[in-house]
Amino acid sequence: MIDFHSHILPKIDDGSASTNESLELLTLSKQQGVDCMVATPHFYASDTNPERFLEARLHSFRRLSDAAANRALPGIIPGAEVSYFEGMSDCPELSELKIEGTSLVMVEMPMCRWSGRMLSELSAIHEKTGLIPLIAHVDRYIKLLHDKKIIDKLSGLPVLIQANASFFTDKRTSRLALSLMSKNKIHLLGSDCHNVVTRRPNLGEAYKVIEVKLGNDALKRISENETIVFADNSSVAEALFI
Ligand SMILES: [Fe+2]
């Protein structure tokens, strides 16, 4: 079980506030059945640049890796949650912000109506760089933009889609989440955990809901998607586009 979205690296964004809290987040994730966590600290092009961000991420990553060494905790894979910015397809360092070992770059879309220009930019990322945008927490746009059909806007685009565990565990949204999952419109899951109090690791709970409601085949599909993206086989990943 891979958690594709987490803010477990200490003191780098609004996620974990200390190395100890990060260790707690890793422990809680392990208890949820997570084998591996993709660390996706926020990247805002307006606040920093890739070079500074990568240096800060490396520092934080090393700190946590050293503290976690010799403990039976989930592995950590460096990534980033890149806030959408105009011209990102032309950013020469974009590939350095990808999820290590994959061709995926996680993109957090703006919380406003998505323009045609924004959607073209997503296509341009794939065309110009070969990277595949992984749309972060698709459920948040559905909720905050009050648009259940927003996922249809991504249809035909070269993107993969990540949803948060809470989409499945929240009784108000679970039905929609399961329906999208059964139509293969959600590819990868994440907890988007930030801390041990209000935004805790909860991926295992979502897996349970999926197993009960959709059966083992759905879990198998998630696992196959994980294998595909880490095999870094773009042509197979392209077959997953909605
Ligand atoms: Fe996030």
Image (cartoon, helix red, strand yellow):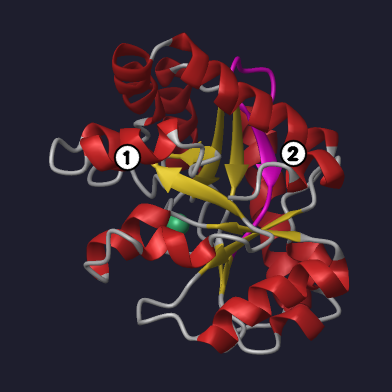
Q: Earlier in the sequence, mark 2 or mark 1?
A: 1
The residue segment tinted magenta is 69-81
Amino acid, disc 1: Ala
> On screen, 118 above or below 194?
below
Mark 2: amino acid: Val
Q: Position of residue 82 (x, y in %)?
A: 60, 68
In this rendering, the answer to whether 92 lies above or below 145 is below
Is residue 73 covered in magenta? yes
The quadrant holding residue 167 is top left
Residue at image point 74% right, 57% down: 98
Q: Is mark 2 within 8 Å of ligand 1?
A: no
When asked about the image quadrant of residue 143, the answer is bottom left
- Which residue position holds label 1? 177
Q: Is residue 94 visible?
A: yes
Residue receiving disc 2: 229
Q: Is residue 218 magenta?
A: no
Where is residue 22 shown, x and y percent of the image? 48, 40
